[in-house]
Image (cartoon, rainbow, N blue to C red):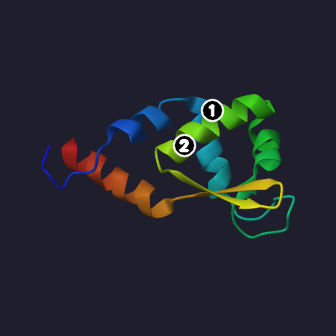
Amino acid sequence: MSPTSPDLGPFLHAITDPARRRILQALKEKGGNSLGKDTGLCACDIEERVKLSQPTVSHHMRILVKAGLVEVKRQGHWQWYRRNQKLISEMTRGLKGQL
């Protein structure tokens, strides 16, 4: 691995779980959230779309945020999540370059 190659470890760990891949896919879809925004989802929207309990979604979101694949913003009592598309694209290119 070259010194400029991205660290793929956290990225690969985050995407190994099928539930986290479903969450990333749900975050990719436009509209359809409970707050009427064009992009991103609150935790309750994610729970509904991927059919997982709140504690399970929270667990997966912590891993995705720690890996940098998802950005979180607090709005009042809500956690608002959206994909970090720039990092996802960078990691995908890095993976392709190493295979």
Q: At x 82% / y 46%, what residue is drawn?
A: 44
Which residue lies most toward the front here? 76
Q: Is residue 88 left or right of residue 29?
A: left
If the image is split into quadrants, where does the C terminus sit?
top left
Q: Are marks 1 and 2 in contact (CB under 8 Å)?
A: no
Mark 2 element type:
helix
- Of circles 1 and 2, the one toward us is 2
Q: In the rendered view, does 77 fall on the left or right side of 1?
A: right
Q: How far from the left and from the top, in percent, is residue 92? A: 36, 51
Q: Can you tell which mark lies on residue 64?
A: 2
**SS assignment at label 1:** helix
**Label 1 to label 2: alpha-carbon separation:** 11 Å
Is tag 1's residue or tag 2's residue first in the polypeptide sequence? 1
Q: Which mark is residue 19?
A: 1
- Residue at image x 68%, y 49%? 26
Sort mark 2 into few (<14), some (14-19) or many (20+) by Cα contacts within 10 Å. Answer: many
